[in-house]
Amino acid sequence: MFLYTTNSPEETVDFGKKLGKLIEPGMVILLIGDLGAGKTCLAGGILKALGVEDYVTSPTYTLVNEYWGSLPVAHFDLYRLDEPDQLFDIGFEEYLDGERVVLIEWPERANGYLPPTHLKVELTGEGERRNISLVPVGAKYRDLCERMKDFVGAGD
Ligand SMILES: Nc1ncnc2c1ncn2[C@@H]1O[C@H](COP(=O)(O)OP(=O)(O)OP(=O)(O)O)[C@@H](O)[C@H]1O
Ligand SMILES: [Mg+2]
């Protein structure tokens, strides 16, 4: 696990950019936190690092937006998912093809459909301060977490 604190949206974008630089094809990143926690903000940093400049800041009315940067990326926002089985209808599992980077906001809604290994990124906080925790599930995500520690240091 890795803990980091940011004090502005820009710092969260920056953290996302650093994480994005270390992401490998096929990685699945779960973005967890309340409304306004900063999930999309952090996803934006990841997308920039993957060479995607023109991204939808709030993919609220579609469940997924797809991008082709240095790697293919699918950005899900499952807030409006009524039931997990809806994921079957949109071919969710086909996005988990081992090539595409998959970012998922509100992964709690996808009960039963999430891949067994992934990186959990949890955001909490108020005002301009956010506590970000990275919790790896699976060996390659533990490596990612270790590399992220070396890359950004302990935070403040
Ligand atoms: N340190 C910070 N990091 C990220 N966002 C911050 C920070 N401080 C303040 N904010 C504000 O918090 C909000 C985060 O919005 P964002 O859309 O990223 O949240 P979200 O978690 O994606 O919400 P939703 O569940 O509605 O999709 C923005 O208005 C941003 O300006
Ligand atoms: Mg969002």
Image (cartoon, helix red, strand yellow):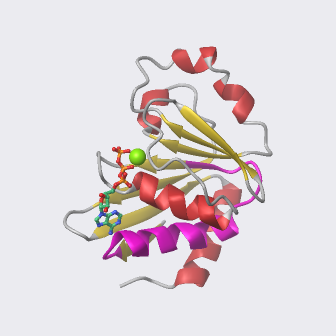
Question: In x, y percent, where is residue 71?
Answer: 77, 54
Q: Residue furthest left?
A: 127
Regarding ligand 1, which quadrant of the image does it lie in?
bottom left
* Residue 76 versus residue 151 in the image, above or below: above
Question: In x, y percent, where is residue 131?
Answer: 33, 67
Residue at horizontal 47%, vertical 68%? Answer: 13
* Residue 53 versus residue 61 in the image, above or below: below
Q: Quadrant of the C terminus?
A: bottom left
Residue at horizontal 35%, vertical 74%? Answer: 5
* Residue 156 versus residue 18 in the image, above or below: below
* Residue 125 versus residue 67 in the image, above or below: below
Residue range (magenta): 6-29
Question: In x, y percent, where is residue 150?
Answer: 60, 83
Number of numbered markers = 0
Does the magenta segment cover residue 107?
A: no
Question: In x, y percent, where is residue 45?
Answer: 54, 64
Can residue 143 be seen by looking at this rendering? no
Residue at horizontal 48%, vertical 27%? Answer: 111
Q: Residue furthest front?
A: 54
Can residue 150 be seen by looking at this rendering? yes
Q: Does residue 92 appear to the left or right of 35 in the view shown?
A: right
Q: Nearer the viewer, residue 44 or 79?
A: 44
Residue at horizontal 63%, vertical 36%? Answer: 115
Q: Nearer the viewer, residue 81 or 124?
A: 81
Q: Does residue 86 appear to the left or right of 68 in the view shown?
A: left
